[in-house]
Amino acid sequence: MTNDTYQPVPHDAAFREQLLSNPAVKADYDANITKYTILDEILSARREAGLTQAQVAERMGTKASAVARLESSLVSDKHSPSIDTLHKYAAAVGKKLEVHLV
């Protein structure tokens, strides 16, 4: 019998450097840097708050699957979350949403 315990992939600077050393991955990353930056911000905020997707969902008044879709949608091009949804997510993790055009 195999050990099927959850083994999360580290999403730290060393892992990012390893991924970005692949030219194809780097080109895709550079083309989508804004999306990846937003995703990094929301995942970092959730991690800092010490919350699971289910806990964020409860605070937002939705289901964990909706939070999972929200987090993955930022880089999937399937659906862009609304500003209202991002406000709710930010509030759920103890942050506020700010949008800046530069």
Image: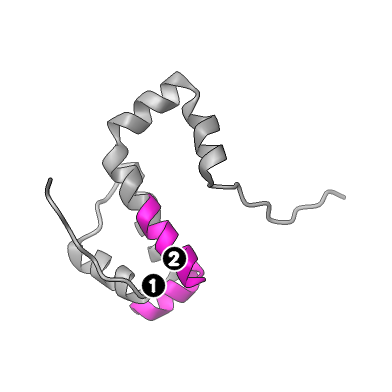
Category of crowding for the residue at label 1, using alpha-carbon neighbours closer than 10 angstroms: few (below 14), some (14–19), many (at least 20): many
Q: Quadrant of the C terminus?
A: top left
In magenta segment, residue 53? yes
Front in this rendered view, residue 27 or 73:
27
Pinpoint residue 37: horizontal percent, then vertical percent: 33, 46
Q: Main secondary structure of the magenta part?
A: helix
Pinpoint residue 101: horizontal percent, then vertical percent: 12, 49
Q: What residue is pinned by disc 2?
A: 46
> For the residue marked with disc 2, what is the amino acid?
Arg
Residue 89 to residue 59: above or below: above
Question: Residue placed at 32% from the left, 69% from the top?
Answer: 89
| Left or right: where 33 falls relative to 55 | left
Question: Residue placed at 51% from the left, 42% from the top?
Answer: 13
Front in this rendered view, residue 97 or 81:
97
Give the SS element for disc 2.
helix
Which residue is the extreme one toward the left? 101
Q: What residue is pinned by disc 1?
A: 93
Residue 32 to residue 95: above or below: above
Residue 61 to residue 2: above or below: below
Q: CA distance from mark 2 to mark 1?
A: 6 Å
> For the residue marked with disc 1, what is the amino acid?
Val
Front in this rendered view, residue 6 or 42:
42
Give the SS element for disc 1.
loop
